[in-house]
Image (cartoon, rainbow, N blue to C red):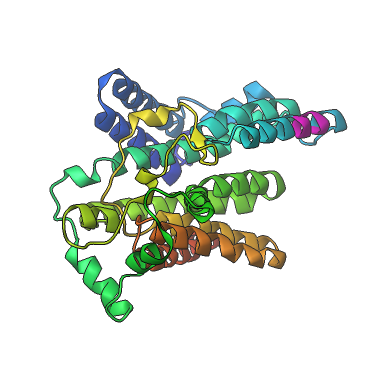
């Protein structure tokens, strides 16, 4: 049979399943759209596998959009001008964008350089799976598992000789009703856990597609490993433990700083309004894991990137100061990032050898 040698990749299967589960979670008409898309995607992959359809979705996308092999000078200049203008707008208006918006904005620049087909085939799985992860993360606290409060507090005190670093930091630096410059800096650093990783992914995609694929897969793996942990071991951050009466002397600084502050980054409307947050997803800290993955791949790209170690460290410290994480959450986030990096490297190595 013609299609016997064709395979449905794990990525294709995961995308279809994630879309369907996301639709079930979101419900309403938007949820039906995701379910329908997931089923349609599954059907297409099955038909492709059995030879009824000869071209994969990636091949069709690239044929329709007609990617070219090289960049001509005019398209390069247009792409650079576009990215500079976009960067200026984001910085001037102090905006932060989500991954779905990166895909949308990226289409315009890839149209200029005639690489849209490759861009969509490489980035759409990333966007879909991260969005599906966020949707599933939002229900992790609704499944009835016992939330860990005291266990984390005890572990943190055992690690720091009876002290809670979050409490010590806030007692010495935070003054309720007074917004200091380092408070604003901490909030901005806290929001830098994901956006730099996406921007670095764009850089890798343009410079080294193979390394980009590994980086993308590593981000996806650590996200879903975290999701499983959230489901099995929901854990509360310091601010929530304070609210529930397990500890005292801790403020949730994020809620006390005026979100209209001109120095706090603002988000644009996004499909992420369909996703509910999960307050008991402290372990592992993805605010530590995502910047750590960026650091690992950046150093792999160039040893000159070693100073980027400051990114996961500063984001982690800010998370602790703001009352969003214990240090033990941060350390576990680092461990998840390293393990995901090693696993993806091993999987890709085995895939190349086979």
Q: How many marks?
A: 0
In this rendered view, identify the residue nearer to me: 280 or 14: 280
Q: Residue at x 55, y 41 (%)?
A: 263
Q: Residue at x 61, y 45 (%)?
A: 199
Q: Is residue 311 above or below residue 154?
A: above
Q: In x, y percent, where is residue 353? A: 56, 61
Q: Quadrant of residue 110?
A: top right
Q: Is residue 73 magenta?
A: no
Residues in magenta, as a range:
76-81
In this rendered view, identify the residue nearer to me: 78 or 350: 78
Q: Residue at x 44, y 39 (%)?
A: 4
Query: Looking at this rendering, what residue extends furthest in the bottom direction?
Result: 161
Q: Main secondary structure of the magenta part?
A: helix
Q: In this image, 34 relative to 140: left or right?
A: right
Q: Quadrant of residue 130?
A: top left
Query: Looking at this rendering, what residue extends furthest in the right direction?
Result: 73
Q: Is residue 79 magenta?
A: yes
Q: Is residue 104 above or below residue 264?
A: above
Q: In this image, 84 relative to 7: left or right?
A: right
């Amino acid at each position: 049979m013609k299609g016997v040698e064709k395979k449905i990749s794990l990525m294709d299967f995961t995308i279809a399943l994630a879309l369907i589960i996301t639709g079930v979670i979101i419900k309403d008409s938007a949820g039906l759209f995701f379910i329908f898309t997931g089923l349609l995607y599954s059907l297409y992959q099955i038909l492709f596998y059995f030879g009824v359809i000869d071209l994969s979705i990636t091949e069709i996308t690239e044929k329709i959009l007609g990617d070219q092999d090289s960049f001509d000078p005019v398209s390069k200049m247009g792409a650079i001008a576009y990215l500079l203008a976009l960067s200026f707008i984001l910085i001037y208006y102090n905006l932060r964008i989500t991954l779905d918006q990166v895909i949308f904005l990226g289409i315009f620049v890839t149209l200029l350089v005639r690489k849209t087909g490759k861009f969509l085939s490489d980035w759409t799985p990333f966007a879909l799976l991260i969005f599906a992860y966020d949707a599933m993360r939002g229900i992790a606290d609704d499944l009835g598992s016992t939330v860990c409060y005291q266990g984390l507090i005890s572990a943190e005190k055992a690690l720091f000789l009876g002290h809670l670093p979050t409490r010590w930091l806030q007692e010495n630096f935070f003054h309720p009703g007074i917004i200091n410059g380092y408070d604003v800096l901490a909030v901005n650093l806290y929001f830098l856990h994901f956006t730099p990783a996406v921007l670095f992914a764009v850089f890798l995609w343009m410079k080294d597609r193979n390394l980009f694929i590994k980086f993308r897969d590593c981000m996806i793996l650590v996200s879903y490993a975290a999701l499983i942990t959230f489901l099995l071991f929901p854990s509360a951050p310091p601010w929530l433990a304070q609210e529930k009466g397990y500890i005292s002397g801790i403020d949730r600084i994020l809620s006390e700083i005026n979100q209209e502050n001109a120095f706090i980054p603002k988000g644009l409307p996004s499909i992420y309004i369909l996703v509910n947050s999960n307050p008991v997803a402290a372990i592992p800290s993805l605010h530590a894991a995502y910047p750590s993955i960026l650091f690992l791949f950046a150093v792999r790209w160039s040893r000159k990137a070693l100073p980027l170690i400051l990114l996961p460290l500063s984001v982690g410290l800010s998370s602790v100061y703001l009352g969003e994480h214990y240090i033990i959450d941060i350390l576990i986030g680092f461990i998840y990032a390293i393990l995901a990096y090693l696993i993806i490297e091993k999987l890709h190595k085995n895939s190349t050898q086979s």
